[in-house]
Amino acid sequence: MKSKLLTILILTGFCKLAYPDSPQAAPDIYAAGPTPPLLANSGLYAAERAAYALLEAVLHQTKSVISSTSCANSTSVSEISIYADGSVNDPAFNFVTVGSITSGYTLNATLSSYSSFWGQTLTINQPATGSFLSHPLYSYSANVAYNGADSIMVMNQTNSVKGVNGLPDSYQSQVIKDFYAATDPNTGLPYIFDWGVQSLSKLNYPVENYWQRSKALRDDATIGRTVFELDRIIGASACQIIIDISGDNNESYFWQTGTLTISSVPPSPAYQFDF
């Protein structure tokens, strides 16, 4: 009897709390359909294409560690440093490091030649075994593609994390990013925005889903800043991952440092996007 009563309370209570009037609306910029060509062509620099893909690689590594343990046990603030000049077939000049070389990991990007019609592809690899929050990370690899207008990035990733049973767990993720450019009407500063979703799979079966947003300011007479935010919307508990870095972001190179923060908090639409 008690179990039946509990079931009724769950179905009538929690379902009513979770039931929306309609599916979640798209961002205002997409309210009338695809963005106009002037906005849809974000004009990303080659260095930005490499940098944004490398930052997404860091987020995959982070998500996999969280999934293999828990968000509550992963809450932390780590250092992150990234340099990319977008040079073709030169991974030594397109890399990101989380933590330090001795207690962390490094990822390198190898870019193909850019085509204004097709776009650009690149691969990302982990040259040596590393760790994050004391969890060994192995065999990261990714295939990335941007379209010619730099408005879409598609990324497929895989890695292995030493799980709680002491054996490597295999994780995969798929990322779809929608970029658009905008200029602040008051300051005239140029920004690059992104909105989308990404999944995390274990042994090729989907287990979690994240809402993603980003905002980047180029160093046009000011210090550049980049914020990537992930909020878990399907998974065991609320979890937020923030990359917040600053420094150089121009046509020649992207060189920024900052923090990678994991918090057990629900989605925060206003998180530090006020720059």
Image (spheres, rainbow, N blue to C red):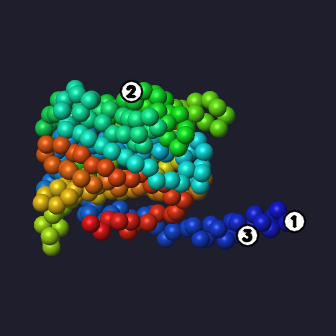
**Closest to the observer, 62 or 209:** 62
The picture places residue 83, in percent across and down from the top left corner, at 26, 41
Q: Quadrant of residue 47?
A: top left
Upstream in sequence: badge 3 or badge 1: 1
Left or right relative to 218: residue 233: right
Which residue is situated farthest in the right direction here?
Answer: 1
Closer to us: mark 2 or mark 1? 2
Assess disc 2: are there few (<14), some (14-19) or many (≥20) residues with their C-alpha within 10 Å of its C-alpha: some
Compared with residue 193, is residue 153 higher up or lower down, i.e. above or below?
A: above
**Disc 3 marks which residue?**
9
Residue designated by label 1: 1
User: For the residue labelled by badge 1, is the local secondary structure a helix, a strand or a loop?
Assistant: loop
Spatial CA distance of label 3 from label 2 is 52 Å
Q: Are marks 3 and 1 in contact (CB under 8 Å)?
A: no
> What mark, if any, has residue 207 been given in the picture?
none
Quadrant location of the N terminus in the rendered image: bottom right
Question: Which residue is depicted at the point 27% across and 29% down?
Answer: 91
Check disc 2 and give the amino acid type.
Pro
Name the amino acid type tagged 3: Leu
- Regarding mark 2 in the picture, which secondary structure is present there? loop
Q: Amino acid at mark 1?
A: Met
User: What residue is at 27 percent from the left and 66 percent from the top?
Assistant: 275
Residue identified by numbered label 2: 127
